């Protein structure tokens, strides 16, 4: 059994992995699937660093503008607010993982944290405002039926 299993050490983590499990990474090194996945995540992280920073506040701003639109203001702010919260959490988690992600450094991860906090709180605010609007509508409807 062991003789037929051709074990090769991964160029990324050094684990002994069966040769047929290994794949070539972008640097033409033989790496195990989990190292390959890590590299892909890192590549995506680098590309989306500024998306992660800009995303949460941008969604919150668009959501806030949505408050001015008739009919759309009933759900657009809450939806975009939710998007801002989710994007904010993603930015925050990326910051917490810190230097393990390519493109994130000690000096620029403060942007991710800021984006996460601002986008998250703003998003929650939008959801809250929308919830109050719905509550207001519900109360208005009740008043109408009572009168
Ligand atoms: Zn590996």
Image (spheres, helix red, strand yellow):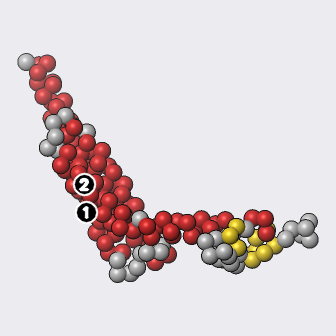
The picture quadrant where one finds residue 57 is bottom left
The answer to whether 126 is drawn above or below residue 35 in the figure is above
Q: Quadrant of residue 1?
A: bottom right
How many residues crowd mark 1 within 10 Å: few (<14), some (14–19), many (20+)? some
Q: Is residue 114 above or below residue 56?
A: below
Image height check: is 141 above or below 19?
A: above
Q: Residue at x 68, y 70 (%)?
A: 24
- The percent coordinates of residue 29 (x first, y second) are 68, 76
Front position among marks 1 and 2: 2
Q: Position of residue 91 (x, y in %)?
A: 37, 64
Q: Is residue 119 above or below residue 110?
A: above
Residues at marks 1 and 2, CA–CA distance in whole angstroms: 9 Å
The residue that disc 2 covers is: 60
Q: Tell me the residue at 85%/71% (across/down).
A: 6
Nearer the observer, 70 or 15: 70
Quickly name the residue at label 1: 118
| Contact flag, marks 1 and 2 (Cβ < 8 Å) | yes
Is residue 7 visible in the rendered image? The answer is yes
Q: In this image, 72 relative to 55: left or right?
A: left
Could you say where residue 95 lies in the image, as x and y percent from the top left? 39, 71
Residue 102 coordinates in the image, percent (x, y): 47, 75
At 41% from the left and 65% from the top, the residue drawn is: 48
Q: Secondary structure at mark 1?
A: helix
**Residue 124 seen anywhere in this rendered image of the structure:** no
Q: Earlier in the sequence, mark 1 or mark 2?
A: 2
Mark 2, other Cα within 10 Å: few <14 / some 14–19 / many ≥20:
many
Q: Secondary structure at mark 2?
A: helix
For image coordinates 46% across by 78% down, the residue present is: 99
Residue 99 relative to residue 14: left or right: left
Q: Residue furthest bottom?
A: 107
């Amino acid at each position: 059994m062991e003789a037929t299993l051709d074990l090769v050490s991964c160029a990324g983590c050094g684990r002994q992995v069966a040769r047929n499990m290994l794949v070539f990474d972008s640097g033409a090194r033989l790496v195990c699937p989990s190292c390959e996945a890590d590299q892909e995540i890192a590549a995506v992280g680098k590309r989306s660093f500024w998306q992660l920073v800009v995303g949460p506040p941008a969604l919150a701003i668009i959501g806030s503008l949505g408050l001015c639109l008739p009919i759309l203001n009933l759900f657009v702010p809450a939806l975009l607010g939710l998007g801002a919260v989710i994007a904010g959490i993603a930015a925050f988690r990326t910051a917490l993982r810190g230097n393990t992600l390519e493109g994130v450094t000690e000096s620029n991860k403060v942007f991710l944290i800021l984006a996460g906090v601002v986008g998250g709180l703003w998003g929650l605010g939008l959801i809250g405002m929308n919830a109050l609007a719905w509550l207001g509508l519900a109360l208005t409807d009740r008043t109408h039926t009572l009168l």
